[in-house]
Image (tube, rainbow, N blue to C red):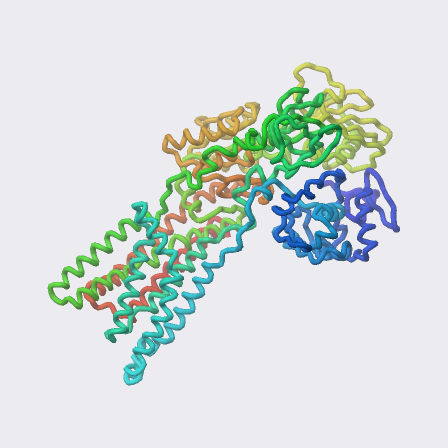
Amino acid sequence: MAKKDKNIPSCFHCGEQCINEQIYFDEKVFCCQGCRSVYEILNQNDMCGYYNLDEAPGISPPTVHKKRFEYLEDEEVKQKIADFIDDETMIVTFYIPAIHCSSCIWLLENLYKLNPDIQSSRVNFLKKQLKVSFNHQKISLRQMVELLASVGYEPLINLDQLDKTKQPEIDRSLWYRVGVAGFAFGNIMLISLPEYFGLDPQSKEQFSLLFGILSILLAVPVVVYSADYYYKSAFNGLKHKNINIDVPITLGIFVLFARSVYEILTQTGPGYLDSLSGLVFFLLMGRVFQQKTYKSLSFERDYRSFLPIAVSKWKDGEEYSISIHQLKVGDEIIIRNQELVPVDSILLSDEANIDNSFVTGESVLIKKKKGDKVNAGAKHVGKTIHLKVEKELAQSYLTQLWNDAVFRNENTHNFETLTNKISVYFTVSILVIAFATAFYWYGKDAGIAFEAFTAVLIIACPCALALSAPFTFGNILRIFGRNKFYVKNSETVEEMARITTIVFDKTGTITQTQGSKATYEGKELTDKQKSEIKSAVYQSSHPLSKMLYKALDEYPLISVESYKEFPGYGIEAIVNNTHYKIGSAEFCGFRQENIMSGVFIAIENQPVGKFSFDSLFRHGLKSVVDELKENYKLKIVSGDNDKDKDKLLEIFPDNTEIHFNCKPEEKLALIKKWQSEGEIVMMIGDGLNDAGALKQSNVGVSVSENINTFSPACDAILDASVFRRLSDFLQYSKNGVSIVIASFIISFTYNIIGMYFAVQGKLSPVFAAILMPISSITVVSFVTLVTNLIAKRKKLL
């Protein structure tokens, strides 16, 4: 960032320098009328304490078209947006991206001071959400949103809020099951202490049956309620002719409970109910750890999260707001600067400048003429345009893209976890050993045969085996998260270890706009002129203006006397009495044929030169490719042209497949093709144009400059700042699988020791109560210690 010019005052409200204009009010200076208006509102309501919490905490409010929120008066929209509504009270949760500091929280939680009909307002800072309760008979939903917008906190309201059903309450049933199992485990252990230590035989005879029945009563909820996850999973597995790890667990639980009840009621033994409840408790804790994910991140957002709820319709010379679901073929709609076109349309205005980056990923303005088709998802840059609806929302290009079969299938790959693979052989082996033991003892002593048979099933219950993968991959998830790599679930970590092919998108994935190198061609510019150009582009929010501003970082900002923006063409400014035009070649008076793109400069209406920006590859890309090429096949698919092909071939191996000018459906088809050839594919992309490929791939990774921005149908979100560590993350996933295999060996060792005694009919309850928890604790400790140790060696911790 450039240093602020000390000679230019900063706005009291938002802190930005008052370069364009300086508005004085109440002995304070403001950069625009919007900031002054917010200050006046707060001052009139005695809320200037807002400015005491942070220095210049405000946001300069944008200009809002008077009919922009008209759609919020629609009853159907109200019902779908509201969390609760009755005759008087409405409760709504808004997502407000502008929330950024303690002053924001203070202001938003004191909204009742701005309007007494607001009953309460609470901020969830981490999720940037505001929950407001208000009397909708006196202040409408539209007025509520307009009030928030007027103080710089405009809510983001999108189409998915109408399409989705209400979010279900957080499922706490797993924690309830853990609580029941833990309570039973602790109390049964206390009841069993005299048995463990052989205390007071006389008291034992008097109370053993009573304590046994109490233990049964405590264990029943554990068996019936806490462990039902495993019964359902085992049943579903067997129904699909698949033996998963929950089959031997279910078998072990039933045998433990049945034998324990038999021993207690017949007074032939104390049973194993403490081991049973402990087994279920540890298993559920593993499940809790396995289910850890990043609730604040969205791995499944689609185009509806970004399309507006409503659009302006033009009919009989009148403009009014209408839900985009209600648009019909032939309707005339109005799209303003920076708004998305919600449906496929035909341009009625003479011309328009269209940015298709939302769909294609390539931020290039395309000039459209009257009669040209404009696809849904296109962003208009420039003066207001009129379009005629060609297709309704359900038939638009964007919707059709998202309706590909790959998005309708919850599970597109037949992926079997390592634990379930081993469980097939484990279950069969245990059953063979159990029946062989029973057969051996049956001819000698039927009582011992029954005890030995059940003892084998009890001691072989794969508690430690079932815990190893959840705790290993759960800890890896945690470590990935600390390193800004947010993986959806533990199955994704295991799938990453199997990857054979990595496919990269180009623009926004292996390239970046920030820090792009600027090259100037033309008449030499003085330092004074560069400073004036920098000050002019500082006024614009266009991406190229921002890039040029950063390229001229070393030059100081100065006051701009006059400024005007021509959306889609460029800007015009007067700085130090010098007239500048900055923008497209045509706008600045360049007439040459086949002129390359860039930011063109004209001084006093005379063309002088242009700034061009090379594609800048992400920091560390070459080293990432060098590390990956030894173990993976690398491929590139891009919607962009082949202008960077030579540069890519300098970085990637000679045998790298590179596909340019790929449409989204073509990217998806390529992923399917490679998978049909036996490849396990990881797709790394960054936007909606990669959505199909990300979803179809075995592991889809979305690279993002901001983890809370668009990340459709992905399995993981990779913060762009740690892109260079991609190879480390993949290798760490492989390490995780090796750790799980090692922990399986430890678990099998405990099982072998236990079965040595079980097949002889010598397995005592005390021995089982000690061996089973120790095996679980050993495995959990081992995987946690080793995953942390490897992470430290890789500098992930």
In this view, the residue in front, 79 or 612, is 79
Q: Where the N terminus falls, by quadrant?
A: top right
Q: Is residue 152 visible?
A: no
Residue at position x 65%, y 46% from top?
A: 78
Q: Is residue 655 visible?
A: yes
- The picture quadrant where one finds residue 278 is bottom left
596, above or below 752, in the image: above
- x and y percentages locating residue 60 in the rendered image: 76, 44
In this view, the residue in front, 36 or 649, is 36
* Relative horizontal placement of residue 683, taking residue 359 as reference (left or right): left
122, above or below 147, in the image: below
- The picture quadrant where one finds residue 440 is bottom left
- x and y percentages locating residue 302 in the rendered image: 55, 39
In this view, the residue in front, 739 or 488, is 488
- x and y percentages locating residue 592 in the rendered image: 70, 15
Going by the picture, which residue comes out furthest to the bottom?
202
658, above or below 150, in the image: above
- x and y percentages locating residue 717 in the rendered image: 53, 43
Q: How many marks?
A: 0
- The picture quadrant where one finds residue 316 is top right
Going by the picture, which residue comes out furthest to the front?
87
Going by the picture, which residue comes out furthest to the top?
593
* Relative horizontal placement of residue 316, taking residue 262 as reference (left or right): right
Residue at position x 15%, y 66% from top?
A: 446
